[in-house]
Amino acid sequence: MYWIAFGDIHESTGLLEVIPGMSEAEGIIITGDITNRGSREAVRRVIDAVAAINPRILAQPGNMDTDTVQAYLKEQDMDIHLRIRELSPGLSLMGVGMSTPTPFGTPSEVPEETITAWLNKTHRLAGDDNQLIAVIHEPPYDTKVDVLGNGQHVGSPGVREFIERVQPVLVLTGHIHESKAVDMIGNTPIINPGMLAGGGYVRINFDGTTVTAELLGIS
């Protein structure tokens, strides 16, 4: 079985129909930034476009999404922010959306300490029985997935410490559009597929025992 994951949609849905295997996937995972400071209508348009291909959606807000976006995801029972969802027997997913402060004053920014507290609180809900995929919109500091175009690392030290300590089987992140990349922290692969408009997405495979993931692109 497999899932398709992507993020940083920013209301640009034109490439959805050409992502291979979308309709056959067990589900679609959206890592954040569904809209651009979006309204209920904006998030509904994006979710409807995804659901037209595959209605099994799990999603969370990024820093560019509003409280209205999060409320809509909750209404649709597809939200993963601060929640644990079972993907399959033996495999769970946890979500932490939003981001630490940016220079742009985006709608859903919280202090570093809040992100760290959310990670720990949500992880405690997971238990120890299942393997865990973590979907964290804010990338970990000092990695290939948190680098601006000028070479500056802008990710979260708290996210990095959480990954080092917990070692999920996979971390999906986003937020930094130009850092489309794969990196490792310990034994944990970290994948940032970049903006959906850039063609990046992740295929997550699970054979009942082992999780593997690939960063893929639409050419």
Image: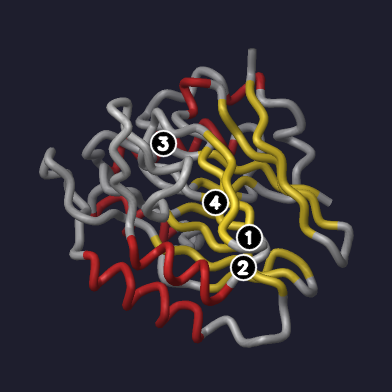
Distance CA(mark 4)–CA(mark 1): 10 Å
Q: Residue at x 49, y 20 (%)?
A: 198
- Tag 2: amino acid: Pro
Q: Quadrant of the C terminus?
A: top right
Q: Secondary structure at mark 2?
A: loop
Residue 24 point in image, percent of width and height: 79, 39
Instruction: Give the mark nearest the N terminus, 4 or 1.
Output: 4
- Tag 4: amino acid: Leu
Instruction: Give the mark nearest the N terminus, 3 or 1.
Output: 3
Q: Residue at x 40, y 82 (%)?
A: 121
Camera-nearest label, 2 or 3: 2
Residue contact at pointers 4 and 2, CB within 8 angstroms:
no
Quarter-of-image position of residue 39:
top left
Distance CA(mark 3)–CA(mark 1): 22 Å
Name the residue that disc number 2 marks. 168
- Tag 3: amino acid: Asp
Name the residue that disc number 4 marks. 172
Name the residue that disc number 1 marks. 188
Q: Residues within 10 Å of mark 1 (few under 14, many from 20)?
A: some
Find the residue positioned furthest to the top.
219
Distance CA(mark 4)–CA(mark 2): 10 Å
Instruction: Give the mark nearest the N terminus, 2 or 3.
Output: 3
Q: Secondary structure at mark 4?
A: strand
Name the residue that disc number 3 marks. 8
Camera-nearest label, 4 or 3: 4
Residue 52 point in image, percent of width and height: 60, 33
Residue contact at pointers 2 and 1, CB within 8 angstroms:
yes
